[in-house]
Image (tube, coloured by chain):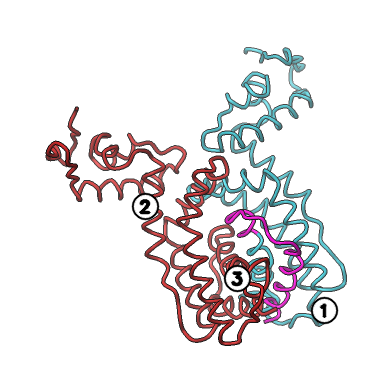
Chain colours: A cyan, B red
Amino acid sequence: MTPSTGPSGTPRRAPAGAAVLREDVTEAIRAAVFEELAAVGYARMSIEGIARRAGVGKTAVYRRWKSKLALVLDLVGAFAVQGLPAPATGTLYGDVRALLEVAAHALRHPVASQVIPDLLVEAARHPEIADTLKAVLLDSQQGVMAQVVRAAVERGELPGGEAEGGGAADPDRALDLVLGPLYWRLVVVRTEPPKGYLDDLARSAVAALTA
Amino acid sequence: MTPSTGPSGTPRRAPAGAAVLREDVTEAIRAAVFEELAAVGYARMSIEGIARRAGVGKTAVYRRWKSKLALVLDLVGAFAVQGLPAPATGTLYGDVRALLEVAAHALRHPVASQVIPDLLVEAARHPEIADTLKAVLLDSQQGVMAQVVRAAVERGELPGGEAEGGGAADPDRALDLVLGPLYWRLVVVRTEPPKGYLDDLARSAVAALTA
């Protein structure tokens, strides 16, 4: 067994049977992954390149994550959880506007603008990536949107009844109408939206939801 | 100068000063590019791999396109032009519904579901790809949407005035509201929409546009 070496020094050996992982090394690897992803993309990224950038040996990476995919999904998962509070402003417009604010912030983060599109490309070829990505990113968003829609139905702002299959109370449809235009503009078209764009989008989305 | 060789035979030599390119070889290369893109993605695709799959020599590819990027942008360009007639149904709902039909068809095509996301990922790192992709894909869509919006303003279905900066007559805003939800569902979320989805989306988009 070769100990990992690098500019940050030889890591302390773990006592037999217990893995002691230095948190500063873990953080250096995490930072290196974002830099590598931004520089070369998921497909071209290697554990070797990550280790070199982090100034650690490959073993230090493999001791923490079993593969490049596991590493990236772990980072995306941490990012997804922090970005999604459920708004409760008391109106559908207020809740939608709050969701758009959080989403716009998240979609301008390097994880969303580079890492997630990268992983979506991989997901088209590898169902296991698609499933993990869906669990990490969409399930929490759907949960938040379901709460927002349920509250709007209770207040009488949206008709109740059909909660699936495209009715006004279907959270998937609501997610399409609220997040779709923002994602399209910020991630696909990538032109700077005009002033007051989120206010306008919230108004438009509420009109679309109640159509 | 080495002639290209391969299972499809040695191509006829072009007379000095004139390039005679066999159309069947060109078509075999085009088909091979789609297969390679689907199998390995843009980043991992090589001219060598394309040539091998097409059963031709690398020279046969380089005689037609100077790089992998030029090749793929050429294919995407041909695809974009064929997919975009400007609807003129006489109502905003009818025009939006027709646009959604064409877009849904296009977004289910392998070019859209695999090649374009691939290129968007590259575009985040290479401004020249972003510019070409924008010219090829968005400019034509914006042109079509501008016509649809102008016709709706003339019929009094949309308020006129501000044609830029987020007003109801701004074609970029219209594109966000019409194509955004569909792209989100078909390319990002990738779950099958319920029956009647395009009708519902057209109704919702018209409500959003006039909000």
**Badge 1 local density, few (<14 within 10 Å), some, or many (20+)?**
few
Q: What is the C-alpha distance between the residues marked 2 and 3?
A: 27 Å
Q: Which mark is residue A96?
A: none
Q: From the viewer's perspective, is residue A92 above or below residue B159?
A: above
Q: Please tell me whether mark 1 sits on a helix, a strand or a loop.
A: helix
Q: Which mark is residue B174?
A: 3
**Residue range of the region highlighted in magenta in the rendering:** A183-211
Q: What is the C-alpha distance between the residues marked 2 and 1?
A: 51 Å
Residue drawn at 17 percent across, 41 percent down: B18
**Badge 3 local density, few (<14 within 10 Å), some, or many (20+)?**
many
Q: Mark 2 sits on what residue?
A: B75
Question: Could you say which quadrant of the image residue A183 lies in?
Answer: bottom right
Q: Earlier in the sequence, mark 2 or mark 3?
A: 2
Name the kind of residue labelled 3 in the image: Ala
Residue A68 point in image, percent of width and height? 59, 34
Chain of the residue under label 3: B
Q: From the viewer's perspective, is residue A119 above or below residue A59?
A: below
Q: Which mark is residue A154?
A: 1
Tell which tag, 2 or 3, sits nearer the viewer: 3
